């Protein structure tokens, strides 16, 4: 049982995934600091003069009914910035590298499909020899 667990942990994909999760977490912290330090003050310019930020109250004299729109916009901007950077810094270069140096694996044909193709090629070769 422990040998199977050890083999699972030492697979390349698991280690790469762990590294990706750690790097992704650090990256989220960077983007969150960016939005907290730059985006939130910009959004506060459009809010009221109170400390609550960009949003509105459902009932004007009850602060507990304040609906904060600023954090929602900040979360959306976080998501967009992270998605754009991951796409342009990870996905596009990986696709270019795969197209340039090949995927390493064939076109995904199964063993049976390959055997059928070989059989058909051999049958065509025999047919062409019989004609000559």
Image: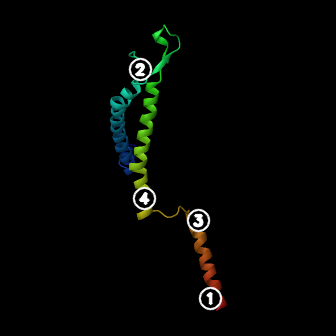
Q: Kindly indicate the quadrant of the structure image that contains residue 111.
A: bottom right
Going from N to C along the chain, the mark reached first, 4 or 2, is 2
Residue 9, horizontal then vertical, whole percent: 37, 45
Frontmost residue, 7 versus 20:
20
Q: Nearer the viewer, mark 3 or mark 2?
A: 2
Residue designated by label 3: 112
Task: Report helix, strand or loop for mark 3.
Answer: helix
Residue designated by label 2: 53
Going from N to C along the chain, the mark reached first, 1 or 3, is 3
Q: Nearer the viewer, mark 4 or mark 2?
A: 2
Going from N to C along the chain, the mark reached first, 3 or 2, is 2
Task: Report helix, strand or loop for mark 1.
Answer: helix
Say above or below: 72 vs 86.
above
Numbered mark located on residue 129 in the image: 1
Numbered mark located on residue 96 in the image: 4
Say above or below: 94 vs 111.
above
């Amino acid at each position: 049982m422990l040998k199977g667990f050890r083999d699972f942990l030492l697979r390349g994909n698991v280690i790469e995934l762990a590294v990706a999760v750690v790097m992704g977490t650090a990256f989220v912290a960077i983007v969150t600091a960016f939005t907290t330090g730059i985006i939130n003050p910009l959004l506060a310019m459009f809010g009221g003069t109170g400390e609550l930020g960009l949003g509105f109250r459902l009932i004007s004299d009850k602060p507990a009914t304040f609906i904060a729109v600023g954090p929602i916009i900040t979360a959306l901007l976080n998501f967009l910035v992270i998605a754009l950077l991951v796409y342009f810094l990870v996905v596009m270069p990986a696709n270019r590298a795969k197209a340039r140096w090949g995927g390493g694996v064939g076109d995904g044909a199964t063993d049976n499909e390959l055997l059928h193709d070989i059989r058909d090629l051999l049958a065509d070769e025999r047919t062409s020899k019989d004609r000559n």
